[in-house]
Structures are given as C-alpha cells and as structure tokens.
Amino acid sequence: MKIVHLCLSSFYIDNYSYQENMLPKYHVLQGHEVTVIASLVSFNSSGEPCLLEKESTKITEDGYKVIRVDYKKAFYKFNKFVRIYNGISELLELEKPDLIFMHDFSFLDVRKVISYVKKNRNVIMFVDCHTDYINSAQTWISLNIFHKLIWRYYAKKISPYVQKFYGTTPLRSDFLRDVYNINSKKIELLVMGIDDDLIKNKDRVLLKKNYAEKLNFKESDFVIVTGGKIDLKKNVHLLMKAVSNLNKVNVKLVIFGIVTTEMKNDFDSLFNSDCMIYSGWQNSNGIVDHLMFADLVVFPGTHSVLWEQAVGVGTPSVFKYWQGMTHVDVGGNCEFLYKDDVNEIENVLDNILESYDKYNVMAKQALEKGLRYFSYSDISKRAIKSY
C-alpha cells in the first residue's frame, strides 16, 4: 500500500523520534511504500523553529521518502502565515497514495487535499490532532477566529472523507470534538510513544554504570532526570529549587536538552553542582538512555512527547497534572503535581524517596505496562487498523 504522510501544519524534523517520523518508519517496516510531504519548518541547533534553505527530496535511513516544499513565492509572507505551498496537488497526483495520513489539518492547502480525495474516492484518509488549549488556542483570536471559525470550517469540509480523527492525547480528542465540532464517533485516541528500536538490547544497570562514569555520579545515587526544551513553561527551575532544598547527598538531578535564552540566567543561578548535572543536547538515542538510566523522571510543567517516552521505557515518573493528559498513568507508574509550587515538588519527591514500597510499586507498574501501550510498532498499526 502507498501511504503519504502530510506534515504541512507545523514542523518536520529529520532523524528525530516524533510521531511524524515514527509512523512512517514503522509503516515501512510493515511493508508499505511511504512518502512524507513536509514543510521547510525544522529546528536549529538551539532548539528553535527555523526554515530550511530550500526544497529537497531524499530517502531517509528508515526507507521512506521525504519531500520538503516551500510556501508559494507570490505573497510569500501571507502564504507562510496561512500555509499555502508549492505544488501540493501535483505532488499528490504524482505520489498516488492509497492512504493519506494528515498530521493536523491547519493549513490552507487542505483545500487541495479535499479536492484530491473528492476525485479519488478510493483513497482512505486519517487525520491526527496535536492541538489543544495548552499549546494553542490561548488567545481569543486564536480560539474563536482561527480554530472555531477557519479550521472548524475545513474540519466540516474534510470530515466526510476522513476515516478517523485521532487525538494524540485525551485533551486533544476533546479539542477535536468541542472546538472543531467533529462527530465523537469519528474520534479516537492515538497516543504518541517510544521507538522500540531505541530500547532494544539496552540494559538499565549497564546504562547507569556507564553514565555514572561519564557524568560523574555514583551508581548508588538516586538519579532524577528531566529535560527537553527548557523554557519557562516546563518548570525545570522549580524542580531545581526543590532538589536543592532536599539536600540529600545521594540524590542527583540530571538535566538534558537546550536551555532557552529566556531561562539561561535563572538556570545558571539555580544550578547546584553538588546535586545537579547538565548533560546538554541529546539525540534520540541519548534521550532514551537518559530516560532509562533514571530512577525517576520528572516533568513538572507543560506536556511534551518525552512524557510518553518516559512511560514507554518503563521508568517511574512525576508529571504536572493537566486535565485530559492523565493517559500517562498506566496504573500507578506515576505521581502528579497539581500546582506550580516548589514545596509540592519537594514533598512529592521526598515521599517517593522515603517509601521503598511506594517506589517499587511505581517501578513494577512502569515496567510491566509502559512499553506495551506506548510502543510505536503497535501505535503505527493502530493508526491505520481500520483501513
């Protein structure tokens, strides 16, 4: 079967473990021919969105084709804003997909996708949603003009041709229903997850031993890991304060990722070399290593795909509570934080550290249930199961 993934609503980043990379990878492994048509939006070395210099076509190491398309040149700034691209209709005609998987539909060239499936009624289409009230729709204009007016209109137009709309979190499933007025019967949850290949043949004990030598902590230390894009909303600064307040010599906080400019001064001032280690930017393999050698993973702020990856590798975790984001609790593997408060973080950590039985229950549930639900080899099958 020929599958075309459309990544035209936001970014596509080469060699990462985002859903936009993993579904194509595992669809290839399942025997399908796969093409990704993506915007030029990527990330630079500082973790900030950027535009690639030019259009390109290449075959990835995972065996699928990626076609990068630029916005139309005439009225370029406007086209960039509403996302109108070069030659989308022509590319669809050239690729001749049996199935289209659209990663969000908030691009104006969705009109051309609708036209294509109208002419080719045998084409099956799936759409996922990465949009919610936390990462978007935060202003009156965004919610009421863009989402409830413009994108709701196109949701209505495209809905007759879509087999399933997938929310990538429960909150995003609600967003599809409540904001875009999509029929609940067409909506399902399709979680983000972990690349199975990255955790094959990895030994937690050996990883901790190797990283203990590399990062200069003891194998016997209780290691808390956090990371990703370290901005104000991620609340890593609150976690840093809490770990310092614990004042436990055998507890180490390892932080990976990129510190944004707005956080650099606070991060530097809060960094405590006695109990903290900054390991810098990590590739996908390094991220998984960090999540696996950790005794506990803590994400005290806004959601990122690292939440699902932490659960997927089977490590006990602490997350900030957000309504509609509790899918990461697979039965006692995690605790939730309900406030942006240093004292609360400190108390939750202290309770876990002081209760051997509590931690063991978390670890057991994480290992037994995490990967089973959050592996991309399984998620990729669920994504097109109704085809």
Image: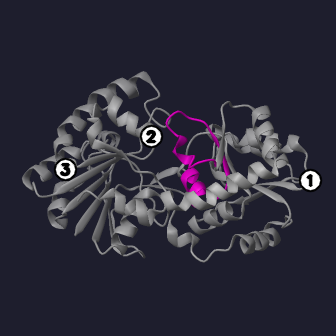
Q: CA distance from mark 1 to mark 2?
A: 39 Å
Foreground label between 1 and 2: 2
Nearer-N-terminus badge (3/1): 3
Mark 1 neighbour density, 10 Å: few (under 14) some (14–19) many (20 or more)? few
Q: In the rendered image, which residue does mark 2 sit on?
A: 170
Quadrant location of the C terminus in the rendered image: bottom left
Nearer-N-terminus badge (1/2): 2
Quadrant location of the N terminus in the rendered image: bottom left
Res. 360 image quadrant: bottom right
Judged from the image, the secondary structure of the residue bearing numbered disc 3 is helix
Res. 255 image quadrant: bottom right
Q: Amino acid at mark 2?
A: Pro
Foreground label between 3 and 2: 2
Judged from the image, the secondary structure of the residue bearing numbered disc 1 is loop
Q: In the rendered image, which residue does mark 1 sit on?
A: 249
Q: Amino acid at mark 3?
A: Val
Nearest to the observer: residue 380 or residue 303: 380
Determine whether, in the image, residue 362 is placed left or right of residue 194. Answer: right
**Residue 188 at x, y percent in the picture:** 35, 45
**Residue 162 at x, y percent in the picture:** 21, 47
Nearest to the observer: residue 350 or residue 115: 350
Q: Amino acid at mark 1?
A: Val
**Residue 270 at x, y percent in the picture:** 81, 43
**Residue 213 at x, y percent in the picture:** 82, 72
Residue 113 badge: 3
The magenta segment is 306-332
